[in-house]
Image (spheres, rainbow, N blue to C red):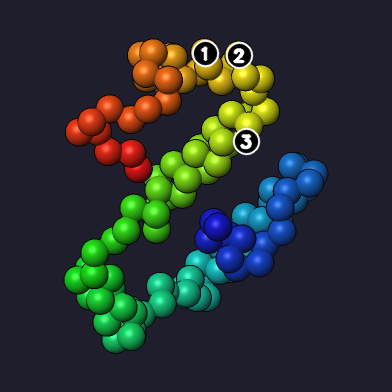
Amino acid sequence: MTLIKWHGVPKLVDRKVEDEERRAKWIAILQSGKAASSIKEWTTEEEAALIKAEDEPMLMKETVLGCLKMQQKQELMVTFRAMSAEEKATFWAEIDGGNGGEVEEGKVEE
């Protein structure tokens, strides 16, 4: 928000006529010494919440990236369910390098 909007001066419609009016209002604002509102003070409750958040570990699922990952997994499952048997076989072959959907020993599925 611009300072002139904060003071309630309307937008321009007819550039020539209203430009002079806006300039006059702006001069009046400057001469009145009225200042824009300041930023809200940081409270002790907000500070405590920030310190608590810093101390606690953040789970991946609580982040935007984690939510996006879950959404992509859900979309993949919907797509997979809609595939024909041949498409599923091709899909598995591409993912596993021909393993048929079996997880190799030592690899961990999420």
**Location of residue 27 (image quadrant):** bottom right
Quadrant in the picture for the N terminus: bottom right
Residue 88 vertical placement versus 4 (above, below): above
Q: Report, in whole angstroms, how far the alpha carbon at label 2 lies from the one at label 1.
A: 6 Å
Q: Amino acid at mark 1?
A: Thr
User: How far from the left and from the top, in percent, is residue 59?
Assistant: 32, 58
Q: Report, in whole angstroms, how far the alpha carbon at label 2 lies from the one at label 3.
A: 16 Å
Residue pointed to by mark 3: 78
User: Can see residue 61?
Assistant: yes
Which label lies toward us, 2 or 3? Answer: 2
Q: Left or right of 38: which side holds 83? A: right
Asked whether the beta carbons under mark 2 and mark 1 sit within 8 Å of each other, the answer is yes
Q: Amino acid at mark 2?
A: Glu
- 2 vs 19, nearest the viewer: 2
Look at 31% across and 78% down and name the residue there: 49
Residue 87 vertical placement versus 55 (above, below): above
